[in-house]
Image (cartoon, rainbow, N blue to C red):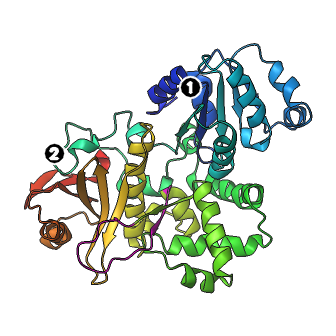
Amino acid sequence: MIPRHLNSKLLQAARLFPVVSLTGPRQSGKTTLVRDVFKDHHYASLEMPDLRRFALEDPRGFLAQFDGPVILDEVQRVPDLFSYIQGLVDEHPDRTGRFILTGSHNFLLLQSISQSLAGRCAVLHLLPFSWAEISRRNSMPLEGLGKSLPGPCPRPEKGLFDVLFTGFYPAIHARDLPPQEWLAAYYQTYVERDVRTIVNVGDVEAFGRFVRLCAGRCGQVLNLSSLANDCGISHTTARRWLSVLEASFIITLLRPYHKNFGKRLIKSPKLYFLDTGLLCFVLQIRTPEELWHRSERGAVFESFVVSELLKNFVHRGERPALSFWRDAAGREVDVLVERGDEVTAVEVKSAMTVVSDLLRPLQSWRNLTGTPDAPCALIYGGDDAFRRSGVVVYPWWVL
């Protein structure tokens, strides 16, 4: 089993809170993680029809059968359980780590927690493997991003485009499965089953077309009206379906940086897929070699960097502090990483050679903010780390 970076945070939360919830996309390894970390807990999966029926018909009796702490898997399948768990927790508020809850649908689970378990529950998220987890090392320390060169780190055996094409879902790596075959089944299950669990999508074919159009807009500023028109759906439906993709951890929306430096800013978010393998599948990229030649390779690489930075925060139990900056004149910084009062500007380029033009947006950012020594980083598709013009250049595989 590949160790997950969230382990220590999960244990810490269970020592502090009566309830710990763990959300994430289906097949991200939630069940494997909690059963490994909490070996002495009872376990019940509410995906099982008989257990789910028992919990629905007799929630008190269902919970009473456990004489110790318990893991309740896919607990959003029985929303009424949250109110009964609240009652049990309030009877003995000092019993920490009593209930470990997992779920695959973010807003269904979090809505129930906010209604019944606010203040009693730690909320954590588990995404698919990070590249650092696959490489069996710690993630890059974000406090040094844009300031210092990375420490010793072995170069990977696989090339960049093999890594992007394969993606990061644990099942593919644990069983060495052909990524496109596994992802095809995963996507089909998601569209035909999970989407209907989250929200009633009457036209599955239209929703599939919507997902493909989102993939084609990966790394771009989101124009929801254009997306809706191209898909043949209403603006309201497009917004609702986008929320479904975000709630089920298929996409993430990178919000624009909130500070105004005197120019009219772009206020719409940028759209990224959280797994590059799934993105390649939806884009109908069939091999790593094809990815190299496709025009979307830059967007796929940018999606990889954004998702790795996001995992760096999330798998330490922290709220992600990522944004982008762009004004109406077209000046742009791909990613801004905020840590307290400090902001690190990050440019992302899939090119394997660094030329001076790649550094220009970062120099513009320093001029714009009036901080000539502001930390700046370029993450690129090459293999060497170095400094150039005051910018720290990182190879993709140190993330």
- Residue nearest the viewer, comparing 115 with 388: 115
* Pair 1/2: label in front: 1
Dot 1 crowding, Cα within 10 Å, few <14, some 14–19, many 20+: many
Residue 146 against residue 329 in the figure, above or below: above
How many labels sit on residues?
2
Q: Residue at x 64, y 14 (%)?
A: 40
| Amino acid of disc 1 | Phe
Element on which disc 2 rests? loop
Toward which corner of the image does residue 94 lie, by quadrant? top right
Q: Which mark is residue 149?
A: 2
**Relative horizontal placement of residue 64, taking residue 233 as reference (left or right):** right
- Residue nearest the viewer, comparing 111 with 294: 111
Q: Position of residue 302 (x, y in %)?
A: 37, 63
Element on which disc 1 rests? loop
Tell me the residue that label 1 is attached to.
Answer: 17
Tell me which secondary structure the magenta stretch mostly adopts.
Answer: loop
Q: CA distance from mark 1 to mark 2?
A: 38 Å
Q: Position of residue 165 (x, y in %)?
A: 47, 58
**Relative horizontal placement of residue 338, taking residue 232 as reference (left or right):** left
Q: Which residues are magenta?
A: 256-275
| Amino acid of disc 2 | Leu
* Residue furthest front as drawn: 91
Q: Is residue 130 visible?
A: no
Q: Position of residue 17 (x, y in %)?
A: 56, 25
Q: Residue at x 83, y 18 (%)?
A: 65
Return the disc, 1 or 2, that comes first in the chain's sequence: 1
